[in-house]
Amino acid sequence: MELIWMIIVGGIIGWLGSILIGRDMPGGILGNIIAGFLGAWLGSEVLGPIGPVIEGFHIVPALLGAIIIVFIAGLVLRNSRGRF
């Protein structure tokens, strides 16, 4: 059951990152979950464990990391659309 909650929280973090940056994360729900997990990892590596914790995610660094991941994914996919 803990894994399901981690997936849900990761998806919500990715979705909030998409909303705050004003771009949709490619891949829909799965993309949001991936952005949430990668964002949590990236944010924790850069900022450390700060802020409240929900299901193993430190919310502040995870959200900031998800914003960075969504931004980078948007740039990469926007630049690669014309090439294929």
Image: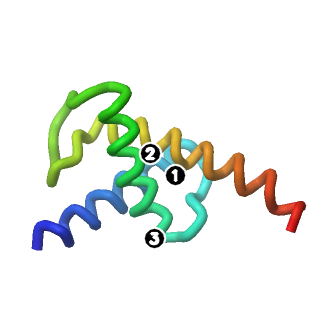
Q: Disc 2 vs disc 1: Cβ atoms closer than 8 Å?
A: yes
The tag earlier along the polypeptide, 2 or 3, is: 3
Q: Nearer the viewer, residue 20 or 51?
A: 51
| Placement of 47 over or under 7, stated as above or below | above
Residue occupying image coordinates x 50% and y 43%: 20
**Location of mark 3 (residue):** 30
**Residue 70 position in % (x across, y down):** 55, 49
Question: Where, by quadrant of the figure, is residue 7 drawn?
Answer: bottom left
Eye-nearest disc, 3 or 1: 3
User: Which element is circle 3 on?
Assistant: helix
**Residue 17 position in % (x across, y down):** 46, 47
| Placement of 31 over or under 73, stated as above or below | below
User: Which element is circle 1 on?
Assistant: helix
Q: Amino acid at mark 2?
A: Ala
Residue occupying image coordinates x 66% and y 51%: 74
Left or right: where 27 falls relative to 84: left
| Placement of 40 over or under 10, stated as above or below | above
**Location of mark 2 (residue):** 66
Gap between marks 2 and 3, in whole Å? 13 Å
User: Which element is circle 2 on?
Assistant: helix
**Location of mark 1 (residue):** 18
Gap between marks 3 and 1, in whole Å? 13 Å
